[in-house]
Amino acid sequence: MTTPLIQTQDVWFAYQHENVLEGISFDIAANDFVAMIGPNGGGKTTLLKLMLGLLEPTRGTVRVFGQAPRQVSERVGYVPQHAAINPHFPISVLDVVLTGCQTPGIKWPRPTPAQRRLALEALARMGAADLAERRVSDLSGGQRQRVFIARALVGAPRILFLDEPTAGIDAQGQHELYCLLEQLNTDITIVMVSHDMLAISTRVKSVACVNRQLHYHPHPELTHEMMEMMYHHPPDQACPVELLAHGVPHRVLRRHPEG
């Protein structure tokens, strides 16, 4: 049996003694494309940061490649919701991607020819090779996000973590980005925090609904239990909710009992 790339076991996390996550246990297999969904404040980004090693569990264990997340940070890529680059700073796209090659503790080293080649290859993989010499400040939101993902790809990660990658991007840009992520997923495991319900049924392979606790579904479907968990509807009062996927409405909550 293949060992999962990511394993969480009875993970709890609290901010100032208030539990944000409780009893989280689930595994992520190689080449999965997981969407983590749930209400604001439900713990999605916190769980992502625990898997990255940016936070430590209050209780329980997180293992990535069988080790503590911080020990394997060079094998993962991360694109936060708000990338830590001033979009108005006069820096080229290629230079932004090259920052993904930096060695910790060394500021702005001169890039090697090999690093420039890797950066250009990462941009090409994101369909952004023609943007290399442009300034980041001149890009659209969708173009900028592709550049930030290219920066995360420079180190050839086996896992890519994305926090709300389509936030602030128009519909066409979202479609293009999801197509590129689908291509990346042929050889990279992707874990994505998202509020985009339409992406659930069209791109991802599994869904983890996070609202303090976690409900995992190994298929790109929203279940009745997940929607209850997200919106706190009692089972006998759940209103119908429909999503459009592939142009077809999908009912994910049952109707009120008749009578």
Image (cartoon, rainbow, N blue to C red):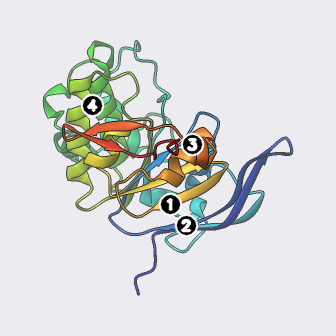
Badge 3 element = helix
- Judge the density around disc 1: few (<14), some (14-19), many (≥20) Cα neighbours within 10 Å: some
Q: Which residue is at the front of the view, 8 or 120?
A: 8
Type of amino acid under label 4: Gln
Residue ID at (57%, 37%) = 39
The reply to whether dot 1 and dot 4 touch (C-beta < 8 Å) is no
Q: Position of residue 225 (x, y in %)?
A: 53, 54
Instruction: Find residue 230 and name its label.
Output: 3
Closer mark to the observer between disc 3 and disc 2:
3
Q: Is residue 257 above or below residue 107?
A: below
Q: Where is residue 188 in the image (x, y as percent from the top left)?
A: 31, 59
The Cα–Cα distance between marks 3 and 4, rounded to whole angstroms, is 23 Å
In primary-sequence order, the first of circles 3 and 4 is 4
Instruction: Find residue 216 and name its label.
Output: 1
Q: Position of residue 152 (x, y in %)?
A: 37, 44
In primary-sequence order, the first of circles 3 and 2 is 2
The reply to whether dot 2 and dot 1 touch (C-beta < 8 Å) is yes
Type of amino acid under label 2: Phe
The Cα–Cα distance between marks 3 and 2, rounded to whole angstroms, is 18 Å
Instruction: Find residue 174 and name its label.
Output: 4
In primary-sequence order, the first of circles 1 and 3 is 1
Closer mark to the observer between disc 1 and disc 3:
3
The Cα–Cα distance between marks 2 and 1, rounded to whole angstroms, is 7 Å
Type of amino acid under label 1: Tyr
Q: Is residue 131 visible?
A: yes
Q: Which residue is at the front of the view, 53 or 38?
A: 38
Closer mark to the observer between disc 2 and disc 1:
1
Type of amino acid under label 3: Met
In primary-sequence order, the first of circles 1 and 4 is 4
